[in-house]
Amino acid sequence: MTDALIALQTSLAERLAALRGCAQHKLPGPLLDVAVRQVALPGGDVYLVRPSDWEALRDEEAAARRPIPYWARLWPSGEVLATHVARNPPCPGTRVVELGCGLGLPTIAAARGGAAVLASDGHEDAIAFAAHSLALNELEATVVQADMDRDADALAERGPFDIVLVADVLYTVANADAMLLLLPRLLEPNGEVWLADPDRAGGRRFLAAARSLFHVRTIEHQDAKLHVLRPR
Ligand SMILES: C[S@@+](CC[C@H](N)C(=O)[O-])C[C@H]1O[C@@H](n2cnc3c(N)ncnc32)[C@H](O)[C@@H]1O
């Protein structure tokens, strides 16, 4: 292992243990067995740090009765959204929030253009990894642990935002309903939501209800749909 990867692992271990409130030796092994993935985006490659064996991490978390670590892999919707952001980079100073950021690729694409980005995820491990990937790309953004239902007030207090980014978060009915309540509280009157979804039932439920609040324009991609929502 290279010195840079060892330093990354050491820093991640400190942050993950602090966020989980446990000793470093209690962290699951697959969480710290990390790899750096180079992702090609319009405008240049970016680097993402992630656990190298997602299935091993999922199995260890299941054995410890912890939630499935959906945050720990890059989903097709995340790539579709990040590509859209990279093709349409928000101007410097644009206020952007990402909900359910996971590894944070769309956040990185937005921060690269100089937007003021708040990345958020309900899972504490995601926060540590997204923050480290930002550092790896020599970019700045604020990264917070926030559940879009339980922490809706705290997220709304940090707004309003010009752009809300969401990729593949609507896989539960609860998330679809929480998103519907949260978005109007986050958005500027002229703001936009850029939402990527692989046509999950929760996504369809959200969109059916959202059409009364937003104009929706949909761009079809092979692995996900990209919906652009503007307040009516
Ligand atoms: C399928 S993953 C998608 C991750 C990333 N957006 C991507 O597309 O690669 C779903 C993400 O949403 C987060 N998430 C799920 N429910 C959430 C909630 N209620 N509030 C905040 N984040 C949530 C998970 O922790 C996870 O990072």
Image: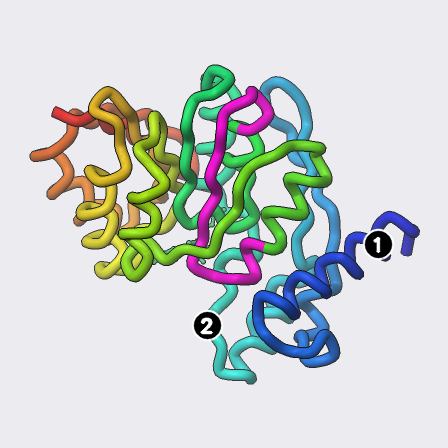
The residue mark sitting in front, 1 or 2, is 1
Residue at horizontal 34%, vertical 31%?
A: 161
Q: Is residue 56 visible?
A: yes
* Residue type of the residue flagged with mark 2: Pro
Among the 4 quarters of the image, the one containing residue 162: top left
Q: Which residues are magenta?
A: 111-127
* Category of crowding for the residue at label 2, using alpha-carbon neighbours closer than 10 angstroms: few (below 14), some (14–19), many (at least 20): few
Quickly name the residue at label 2: 67
At 47% across and 20% down in the image, what residue appears?
A: 93
- Tell me which label, 1 or 2, sits earlier in the chain: 1
Q: Is residue 88 magenta?
A: no
Q: What is the x, y in percent for residue 135?
A: 69, 40
Which residue position is annotated with label 1?
Answer: 7
Q: Circle 1: is it few (<14), some (14-19), or many (20+) Cα within 10 Å?
A: few
User: Label 2 CB, ligand 1: below 8 Å?
Assistant: yes
Which percent across, then down, holds residue 107? 52, 36
